[in-house]
Amino acid sequence: MKNGFKVLDSDLHTMEPDGLWEKYLDAPFKKFAPQFTRGSENASNQPVIRIGALEIGEMSKRRQTAVVGKDLQQRAFARHPHYEVAHARGYDSESHVAAMDIEGIDVAVIYGTRGRQVLMHDDLEPEVAAALARAHNDWTRDFCAYDPRRLKFAAQVAFHDVGLAIREAKRAVRELGAVAVIGNPNPVGGRHIHDPEFEPLWDAIEELEVPVGFHPTGQSSLRDDIARRYLDHPNGRVIGVAGRNPMELMLAFASVAAGGVLERHPGLRCAFLEGTCGWLPWWLWRLDEAWEKFGPGSEVQVSQLPSQYFFRQCYVATDADEKVLKQVVEAVGDDNIVVSTDYPHSDGLFPHAIEEFVAIEGVSDKTKAKILWDNCARLYKLNGIR
């Protein structure tokens, strides 16, 4: 709790250990355990991820990126001594709960970091990708077992094969207790999320009554990734960080709304996470305008405007210090916004994220209470937690 507000973080992260997959992969797939390489070959401070013969590379080829990244991490560590403690402990469950206490977070929904990154290659064999996701979910279940009332998690599924994704979504929710399924906003293998091939997956998730949390990643070798066009730009990291997440999420919402996914699955809840919320009013207006002009002649017909689908079944996460939140609430209301701290990523605000949110001017306490708890509890169906 922070300043009298209950806090449910829609998107807290794990920092998974290098050896996770060597320990948790099923025996036939252990040879595909990701290898994380750091050293002089790296242009940035990101490890190159190797899975068999495939490589998931850095998001910048400029060496200055490493300097910027290390400086960002040093500033994060300087904000509070807990970073040093958590780092020394390998960002384990106990240090996460301690960080939540410091920040004032009552309950958090956990999303992976490397668990997302290791799947970001179009050419992964579907069975290998599914095994990587399965191992990560097993590890995350064990991570959350330290305090299952406060630590919930979103399950990773691999979008390389729909049937395998369905099987893992059902297992993760029914057997492991996942409260959401992570959705990839980018096309994987050239297939968009509105592709008819994904219909059985949306059927299954709707039946499971958990939301899809669309969440970009910080490292990707997917061919269709906005940030990769700036790999050789001298300030590509700046452009990628500023533009990639919001734009990928904007396009993901357009895909499920205009592509008919939300029309066909009225019980499917979708969240668009870690991409800010300032884009939402303009994008809803823009999509509605485009639909009114071009929708009547489109191949896929839907009965409502894109904005109506958003208000009916979608949510967006605001950054804790998003100064335009006041304008967003004035434009679209406060029923579909949740908050994310992004701990322990170094570009987050720990330990001041919730403090910064509570201090935002022009937003009522009633609205802040909805964003900090009520909306997120409704999204993840966690209303029974007190």
Image (cartoon, rainbow, N blue to C red):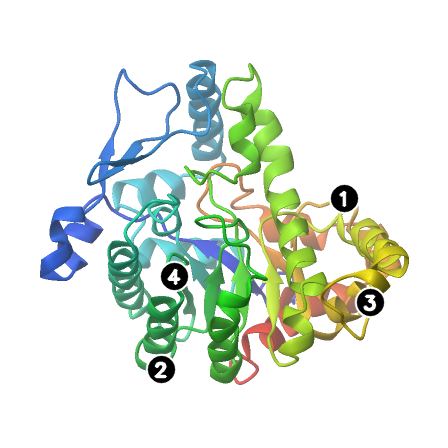
Q: Nearer the viewer, residue 86 or 35?
A: 35
Q: CA distance from mark 4 to mark 1?
A: 31 Å
Residue 200 against residue 220 in the figure, above or below: below
Residue that label 3 marks: 305
Find out whether the residues at labels 2 and 1 contact each other: C-beta distance under 8 Å: no
Q: CA distance from mark 4 to mark 3?
A: 30 Å
Say few, some or many: other residues with alpha carbon within 10 Å of mark 4 (under 14 / 14 to 19 / 20 or more). Answer: many
Residue that label 4 marks: 156
Residue that label 2 marks: 174
Q: Residue shown at 26%/61% (left/top)? A: 139
Q: Position of residue 226 (x, y in %)?
A: 57, 36
Circle 4 or circle 3, nearest the eye:
3
The residue type indicated by label 2 comes to: Arg
Give the total of numbered labels.
4
Say few, some or many: other residues with alpha carbon within 10 Å of mark 2 (under 14 / 14 to 19 / 20 or more). Answer: few
The residue type indicated by label 1 comes to: Lys
Report helix, strand or loop for mark 2. helix
Q: Position of residue 222 (x, y in %)?
A: 44, 41
Q: CA distance from mark 3 to mark 2?
A: 34 Å
